[in-house]
Image (cartoon, rainbow, N blue to C red):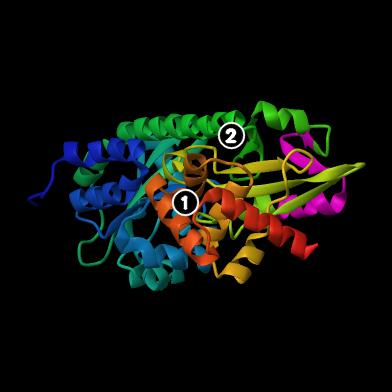
Amino acid sequence: MTRPISFDQASLSLLDAAIDPSQWTRAMDTVAQYAGATGAVLLQIRGRGPGTPHSASLGEGLEVYFRDEWHLRDKRERGIPHMREKGIFVDQDFVTRDELKTSDYYNGFLRRFEANWSAGIGFSNDDDEWCLVIERGEKIGFFEEKEQADLVRFGPYLDRAAQLARHLGFANATGMLDAFEALGCASFLLDQAGQVIRHNAQAERLLGDGLTLLRGRLRCDRSADSLALGQLTAALGRSTGLTPAEAPLVTVHRLAKRPLVIQGIALAGLASAVFSPATSILLVSDTDERPLPTPTQATQKIFGLTAMEATLLSFLEQEIPMPAAAEALGISFETARSHLKRVFSKTGTSRQADLLLLLRRVHRAQR
C-alpha cells in the first residue's frame, strides 16, 4: 500500500498537537490516514469520558459511545493486558470470529460506524494510562502483524506528547492563578474530579474565613452552600465547554460579614490541554472588598445582552481588566473588544465608566 504520508509526519503531528491543542483533530486524522483507517481517538483507560481528541470521522460514533454508555461495557478492555505486555492490542488477540458476528458491541454498534477492527497503542502520562485507538471497518479489515509492528512505534511519541502537553497546560493554568493574584482576585485551580490542585495567596487568605480546604476539596460553613459549590465543581468537571454564563454563581454566607461569591470557569486553549490535570478555575469575590456583580441573567433581560456579553460585563464590573477577562472567557482581546462595543450600543453608553455607573443604578433599583 502506498502511504500518502510518512511515519515521521504522522508521529510529529502528535508533538505539534501537544504544543498547540487546536491541532489534535488534525493529528488524529493524520495518524488514521497513515494507518489506512476510518479514524483515531485517544481514550483514558480509567475514568474515560467525552471530549478527548479524535478524528472528525469518529465524532458521531463517540457521541453514541458515551451517550449510550458503551464505554461502560467496552469489550476491548480485554485487550488491555495485551497492550501492557507488548505495547499494542488488536481485536484478534481476544475476540473470536463468532463473537464478532453475534456481539451487539461489534456487530451492532462498531460495525455501524466502520470501526469494528482496531489497534490500541498504550502510553502513560504520570499516573494516567491512555490508549490511542485506531479504527477500521470491514472494507479494510484487521491489522496484520506487520502493521502492528509498525504502529507500536507510535508509543514513545505518544509518551512524549502526553508529558509535554501536561507540563505546558499545567504551567499555563498556574500562570492564570498568578495573573488573577496580580488583580487581587482569589482563585482555585481544580482537576476534573473537583479537587483543588493549587490556589493563589488571595485564596489562601479566605481559608478559615467562609471556606475550608479539607482533603483537597473546598467546603463552606453552611451545608447548603457546600452543596451548591459541589454542584458547580461537578458541572465544571463534566463539561468540555461550559461558559461562565452557564455556570451558576455560588454564594458563600459568612457570620457577621458579607458573603463570598464564587464563579466557575472551564479552562480553554493551552490551559485546557487534554493531559493537564487542571480543568477549571474558581474565582472568589469577597463582597466586603468589592461590589457584588449584577447577575448576568438580569443584564441579559434588561439590556438584551448575549450570554457572552453579560459575562464580560460581569468581569468588568468586578474590576477585572479586559485582557484578563478575555483570557478567562477563552477569546482573543480583539473579540472581547468587539463584544464590549456591542454592550455599549445595547446599553446606550460609550465609556466603561458610564457603563459601570449604569450598573450601579440597576443594582439600586433591584434592592
| Badge 2 element | helix
Residue farthest toward the right in the current orientation of the protein: 256
Residue 47 seen: no
In the figure, 189 relative to 143: above or below?
A: above
Report x, y in % for residue 27: 28, 46
Instruction: Decide: few, some or many residues near mark 2? Use Cα within 10 Å; few <14, some 14-19, many ≥20.
Output: many
Residue 167 seen: yes
Residue drawn at (59%, 45%) of the image: 192
Q: Amino acid at mark 2?
A: Phe
The verdict on residue 226 being magenta is yes
Report x, y in % for residue 339: 45, 57
In the figure, 192 relative to 178: above or below?
A: below
Number of dots carrying numbers: 2
Residue that mark 2 sits on: 180
Determine whether, in the image, residue 9 is placed left or right of residue 321. Answer: left
Residue extent of the magenta highlight: 212-231
The verdict on residue 162 being magenta is no
Image mark for residue 171 = none
Between circles 1 and 2, the one closer to the viewer is 2
Report x, y in % for residue 271: 47, 39
The foreground one among 340 and 130 is: 340
Report x, y in % for residue 125: 46, 33
The foreground one among 39 and 342 is: 342
Determine whether, in the image, residue 259 is placed left or right of residue 326. Answer: right
Q: CA distance from mark 1 to mark 2?
A: 46 Å
Residue that mark 1 sits on: 78
Residue farthest toward the left in the current orientation of the protein: 2
Residue drawn at (77%, 51%) of the image: 251
Quadrant for the C terminus in the image = bottom right
In the figure, 143 relative to 167: above or below?
A: below
Determine whether, in the image, residue 360 is placed left or right of residue 5. Answer: right
